[in-house]
Image: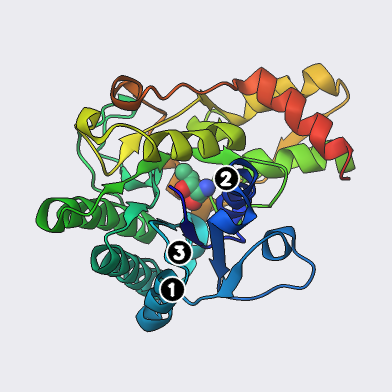
Amino acid sequence: MHKVMVTGCLGQIGSELVAQLRAQNGVDSVIATDIRRPDHNETVESGPFEVLDVTDYDRMLKIATDYQVDTLIHLAALLSAVAEERPQFAWQLNMTGLVNALEVARELDLKFFTPSSIGAFGPSTPKDNTPQDTIQRPTTMYGVTKVSGELLCDYYHTKYEVDTRGVRFPGLISYKTLPGGGTTDYAVDIYYEALRKGHYESFIKEGTYMDMMYMPDAIGAIIKLMNADPERLIHRNAFNITAMSFEPEQIKAAIQKELPDFEMTYAVDPARQAIADSWPNQIDASCAKAEWDFEPQYDLEAMTKDMLAQLKTRI
Ligand code: VAH
């Protein structure tokens, strides 16, 4: 990955991935793109940036050609909760954007990464220790686009030898850029509210386990997978990865170790609870560990300490 084009660079993953790649390989090694050019944004001002609507193939091809990139990391997509509110638009954006990105990668012989999600699983998937290869019948539009995306990325690898790689991300927790419209966002919001108000009202009910990961581990996983020896890869799209699985009472307890007066109540959102209920409790990441040495560094306690320390300097 010498010259990387990133779509959705202003999002929760994109903003941190661009920063990390620019720090590692130089600011001009990353062409950051997103649908709008915001005022006063570090990602936009720290290196090359282009406005790109990922449904515009010609524009995407021109940017990748003009900058002579060798890798395309496609992140632009709607997340689960927003996608369930606007399913037809979600299909159109997530799938048209992905097909365009894969076509650009095929046309220019680029290495390719796009994330899938634990949302690619559904109610009939084994919920505990969910295998790498198993039933995938998601009941959300987000999940339908993620399963379709996994199949499409494998197809482009098999049919056109495009070097496509992906991971099924768990819920991602970070302090630099807020997530937009996800089901696991409660596990981000809780840290902000704990510091601002000492109280959080959870929209996900007690006892709802979901896989989660701290953003530094997510960014490290993308870079590690993209640099992995292709000869070792048995799977490609997309690898189960996770760092922890917890339910709301457990993240509450972890926060209370740092902020003893923190309290949490519940106001369950039926729409996002239904999405969470359709997902696994905890997935098996053994293939990622075996094929490209995936190894997360943060557990719930370490993540909580760092999240609160970092947010204290921002709030
Ligand atoms: C979402 N944060 O909630 C995303 C992610 C596994 C969850 O895909 O939609």
Q: Give the spatial CA distance, label 1 vs label 3.
A: 16 Å
Left or right, 249 with reference to 164: right
**Pointer 1: what residue?**
54
Residue 275: horizontal and vertical position, in percent? 44, 49
- Residue at 66% x, 61% y is 47
Residue 52: horizontal and vertical position, in percent? 51, 76
- Within-10-Å neighbours for mark 1: few <14, some 14–19, many 20+: many
Are the residues at dot 1 and dot 3 in contact (C-beta closer than 8 Å)? no
Q: Is mark 2 within 8 Å of ligand 1?
A: no
Is residue 82 depicted above or below 191 in this figure?
below
Q: Disc 1 on helix, strand or loop?
A: loop
**Pointer 2: what residue?**
25
Indicate the amino acid at tag 1.
Answer: Val
Mark 2 or mark 1: name the one nearer the start of the chain: 2
Is residue 165 depicted above or below 109 in this figure?
above
- Residue found at the far left of this picture: 159
Residue 163: horizontal and vertical position, in percent? 25, 49
Is residue 181 visible in the rendered structure shown here? no
Q: Is mark 3 within 8 Å of ligand 1?
A: yes
Front position in the image: 34 or 203: 34
Left or right, 289 with reference to 234: right
Q: Give the spatial CA distance, label 2 vs label 1.
A: 25 Å
Tell me the mark number nearer the camera, choosing from 2 and 3: 2
Indicate the amino acid at tag 2.
Answer: Asn
Tell me the mark number nearer the camera, choosing from 1 and 3: 1
Is residue 236 visible in the rendered structure shown here? yes
Residue 102: horizontal and vertical position, in percent? 29, 64
Is residue 313 depicted above or below 298 in this figure?
below
Q: Disc 3 on helix, strand or loop?
A: helix
**Pointer 3: what residue?**
83
Indicate the amino acid at tag 3.
Answer: Ala
